[in-house]
Amino acid sequence: MPRVWDISPPVSASSPVFPGDTAFVQQWTARIAPGCPVNVSVLRLSPHTGAHADAPLHYDAAGAAIGTLDLQPYLGRCRVIHAIGCTPLIEWRHVERHLHELPPRVLLRTYAKAPLDAFDPDLCAFAPDTVARLADLGVGLIGIDTASIDPAASKTLPGHQVIRRRGLRVLENLLLDEVPEGDYELIALPLKLVGADASPVRAILRELT
């Protein structure tokens, strides 16, 4: 059987969220007891909780919602590239040696060990030129192990604006701590949330055979 890497961080009340975003809350509406055969809960969370896919609607007022997008970009061959400690921005020089026969999906690992219990205001982000040059090479999806492809304090979101113009898809907040550099099969399907600006994903990598 091909090996599988789970690249989704755990989601719980302790999961960090972007400052000002909605924290995860789970409440029980029914518990197994005499007269009740099931446990049922209600969840309150931002669609940007944990590993997630941004929709164009997130960064474009006229953009498509996540539930209307083609799933093909989120499924298929990808390359994991290590750019650990390349703060504050992942520049072209940090990735160019990995780009021979590049598949259409690229995931960047920037943390030696991802923070799972606190938001990182100094997160590493993509330089907009890096996003544009990956698009020039035929990349249709980029992913990163931080909470955003743009710096946390950015108000203009230049990386997101590049993916808007070029029609790329994006995954954020992946967990790549245990994943060696190389090529894999990515499976990271968003939920069919027909009006939402993003969706959590259960992202995995599968060993190529």
Image (tube, rainbow, N blue to C red):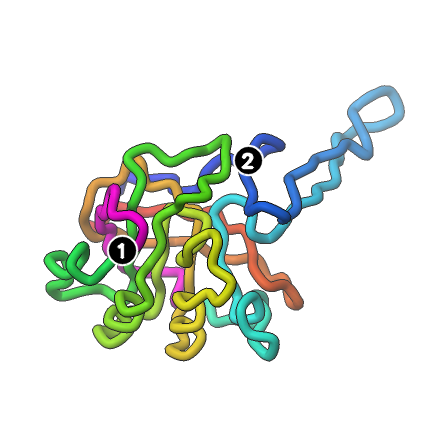
Residue farthest to the top? 34
Q: Residue at x 53, y 66 (%)?
A: 55
- Ranked by sequence position, the earlier of labels 2 and 1 is 2
Q: Residues within 10 Å of mark 1 (few under 14, many from 20)?
A: many
- Res 168 → quadrant: bottom left
Q: Position of residue 128 (x, y in %)?
A: 33, 67
- Pair 2/1: label in front: 1
Is 84 included in the stretch rendered in magenta?
Answer: yes
Front-lying residue, 55 or 208 = 55
Residue ID for mark 2: 15
Q: Is residue 84 rendered to the left or right of residue 116? A: left
Q: Position of residue 17 (x, y in %)?
A: 56, 43
Front-lying residue, 86 or 72 = 86
Q: Residue at x 47, y 71 (%)?
A: 70
Which residues lie in the magenta part? 72-90
Depicted 66 relative to depicted 52: above or below? below
Q: Is residue 44 rendered to the left or right of residue 197? A: right
Depicted 207 relative to depicted 113: above or below? below
Q: Position of residue 113 (x, y in %)?
A: 33, 33
Q: CA distance from mark 2 to mark 1?
A: 25 Å
- Res 159 → quadrant: bottom left
Residue ID for mark 1: 90
Q: Residues within 10 Å of mark 2 (few under 14, many from 20)?
A: some
Q: Amino acid at mark 1?
A: Ile
User: Callout 1: helix, strand or loop?
Assistant: strand
Q: Amino acid at mark 2?
A: Ser
